[in-house]
């Protein structure tokens, strides 16, 4: 007898609010390390052993809402109901929305327990994307120095911090050479590192990441199961991508394998969607009891409403009769005043209302007298139900047979087959989702072609994979196979994966902060910010390359303008001489 295949279920993780920590004595002078990712933000103390805060880099803030009504990170228990109101500070992987970034920093500093009045008296290490635009860094520096009053800031590339952490862990010299392949939620990068420094001129970005893979997987399954479109949410697709997908060694051959029925039965993952199945009761007595309870409940509601209506009508009738008595007693002025209060114009209208209310009260009394007859009919109905037990038992048997033939749980199952391979493949073939750009391996080959053969050999000896979107099983073997195809015969190369692809950037920033005390190389002080501008970057082994913005002074602009005027005058004189000659 064959084993029944396992059925997986969605966890549907609910975020719990982060506690507000207290600043430990060893953290008083410790830097704050913030891995500011476009998908997740990780924050903690450099003196700590792990990040204290890990949350989604989003904020839920409705239009016109006050600042203190915004929800950030883990304060949002379930993202799906608020999916279309979520706001991010990022455009792709660059910070462009300072208002949302300020909310994220408020969340971080508050939950870390920093309660100093008006400022954050701790150095801060913040990650940034490769080749970060100067304007984005300027906004970040202005936010940290002007709004929070931090004493010093250091910026570093997240994937280079991960590279640095793994090199330190394995005892590799900091002046190493290698090729970093990173993939995040919105984009992927190929970063050449030569002698311990980033070669920014040959860095390349691919605008495909985990977000595109999740959206592609959602589209595939919604087309496959159009009945369950609402249940196939982005959050569940992220769970499928992280726990059930893998990178194939050879994509076309893998798809051919899935054509086999035996391979499909062995490798397909059955994932159960939540559902509420209606359980048919086999007990006739229980069904009769439920009917009787419903009938009694309806009777009680109707009786209560009738009593309330009857009391209101009787009270109003007494009021109208008292007004009519005023006319009979001869109090004409008081009678007309009472009619005005009742919004009536004449005695005939008053008499008409009295007649209508009298008829209504009489009808209520007739209905009330018939309630006892309804109760007796209910008792007779119970007797009739006992006579129909045999017919109802046959209906129960029929419904039970139908339930056995139609499995409601299996109807709400997703059979995830080739989708397990097709979703991660967009990283290597962006054309699957209509993106006209190179895949990760083609980009790697393009970067290698920019160097001499000796430098190429040095780079491929240390190919490093990092990032949350490179945690699929089989990704290392796929990169090795692709490198074997593009490199010369019998050439040596080595591919390694980060120990914690999603967290190593934070641990690398923490390690760098501990090994480089504040005030040294790589730190930007308040004085540097005021003298050199917000876009200034103090370079270090895991940072970008600082290329200052060339701004022409007023004298230089004046000289340029005078040069253009002189050239125009000479051109006019030449033209005049030509006309004279003619």
Image (cartoon, helix red, strand yellow):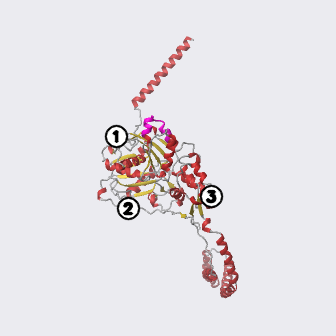
Asked which secondary structure carries label 1, the reply is helix
The numbered dot on residue 10 is none
Contact, mark 2 vs mark 3 (Cβ under 8 Å)? no
What range of the chain is rendered magenta?
444-458
Q: Position of residue 258 (x, y in %)?
A: 60, 54
Which quadrant does the N terminus fall into? bottom right
Question: Residue 73 at x, y = what percent?
Answer: 45, 58
Q: CA distance from mark 2 to mark 3?
A: 54 Å
Classify residue 539 as left or right of residue 348.
left
Magenta-drawn stretch contains 445: yes
Residue at the spot of label 1? 531
Q: Is residue 238 magenta?
A: no
Which residue in the protein does label 2 denote?
20
The CA distance from mark 1 to mark 3 is: 69 Å
Label 1, label 2: how many angstroms apart (C-alpha)? 36 Å
Residue 347 seen = no
Disc nearest the viewer among 2 and 3: 3
Residue indicated by mark 3: 261
Between 158 and 461, the one nearer to me in the picture: 461
């Amino acid at each position: 007898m064959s084993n029944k295949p396992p059925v997986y279920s969605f966890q549907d993780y609910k975020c719990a609010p982060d506690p507000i920590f207290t600043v430990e004595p060893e953290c008083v002078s410790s830097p704050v390390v913030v891995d500011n990712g476009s998908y997740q933000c990780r924050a903690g103390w450099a003196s700590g052993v792990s990040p204290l805060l890990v949350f989604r880099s989003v904020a839920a803030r409705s239009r016109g809402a006050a600042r203190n009504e915004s929800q950030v990170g883990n304060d949002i228990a379930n993202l799906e109901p608020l999916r279309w109101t979520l706001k991010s500070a990022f455009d792709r992987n660059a910070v462009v929305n300072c208002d949302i970034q300020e909310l994220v920093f408020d969340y971080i500093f508050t939950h870390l327990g920093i309660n100093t009045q008006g400022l954050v008296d701790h150095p801060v290490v913040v990650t940034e994307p490769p080749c970060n635009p100067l304007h984005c860094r300027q906004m970040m520096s202005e936010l940290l120095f002007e709004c929070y009053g931090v004493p010093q800031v250091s910026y570093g590339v997240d994937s280079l911090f991960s590279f640095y952490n793994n090199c330190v862990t394995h005892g590799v010299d900091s002046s190493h050479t290698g090729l970093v392949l990173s993939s995040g939620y919105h984009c992927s990068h190929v970063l050449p590192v030569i002698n311990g420094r980033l070669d920014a001129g040959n860095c390349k970005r691919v605008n495909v990441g985990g977000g595109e893979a999740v959206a592609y997987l959602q589209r595939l399954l919604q087309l496959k199961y159009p009945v369950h479109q609402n249940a196939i949410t982005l959050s569940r697709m992220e769970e499928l991508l992280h726990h059930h997908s893998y990178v194939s060694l050879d994509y076309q051959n893998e798809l051919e394998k899935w054509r086999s029925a035996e391979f499909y039965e062995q490798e397909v993952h059955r994932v159960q969607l939540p559902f509420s199945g209606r359980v048919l009761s086999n007990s006739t007595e229980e069904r009769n009891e439920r009917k009787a309870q419903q009938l009694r409940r309806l009777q009680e509601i109707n009786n209560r409403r009738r009593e309330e209506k009857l009391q209101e009508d009787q009270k109003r009738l007494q009021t109208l009769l008292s007004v009519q008595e005023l006319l009979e007693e001869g109090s004409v002025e008081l009678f007309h005043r009472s009619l005005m209060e009742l919004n009536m114009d004449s005695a005939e209208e008053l008499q008409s209302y009295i007649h209508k209310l009298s008829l209504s009260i009489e009808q209520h009394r007739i209905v009330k007298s018939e309630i006892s007859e309804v109760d007796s009919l209910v008792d007779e109905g119970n007797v009739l139900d006992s006579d129909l037990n045999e017919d109802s038992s046959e209906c129960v048997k029929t419904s039970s047979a139908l339930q056995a033939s139609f499995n409601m749980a299996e109807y709400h199952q997703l059979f995830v087959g080739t989708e397990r391979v097709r979703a991660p493949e967009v990283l290597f073939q962006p054309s699957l989702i209509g993106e006209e750009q190179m895949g990760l391996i083609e980009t790697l080959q393009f970067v290698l072609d920019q160097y001499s053969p000796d430098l190429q050999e040095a780079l491929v000896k240390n190919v490093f994979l990092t990032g949350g979107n490179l945690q699929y099983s089989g990704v290392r073997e796929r990169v090795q196979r692709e490198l074997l195809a593009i490199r010369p015969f019998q050439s040596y190369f080595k591919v390694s994966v980060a120990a914690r692809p999603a967290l190593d950037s934070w641990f690398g920033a923490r390690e760098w902060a501990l090994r480089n005390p504040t005030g040294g190389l790589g730190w930007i002080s308040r004085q540097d910010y005021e003298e050199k501008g917000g876009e200034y970057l103090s370079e270090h082994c895991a940072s970008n390359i600082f290329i200052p913005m060339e701004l022409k002074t007023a004298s230089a602009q004046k000289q340029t303008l005078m040069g253009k005027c002189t050239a125009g005058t000479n051109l006019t004189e030449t033209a005049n001489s030509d006309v004279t000659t003619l």
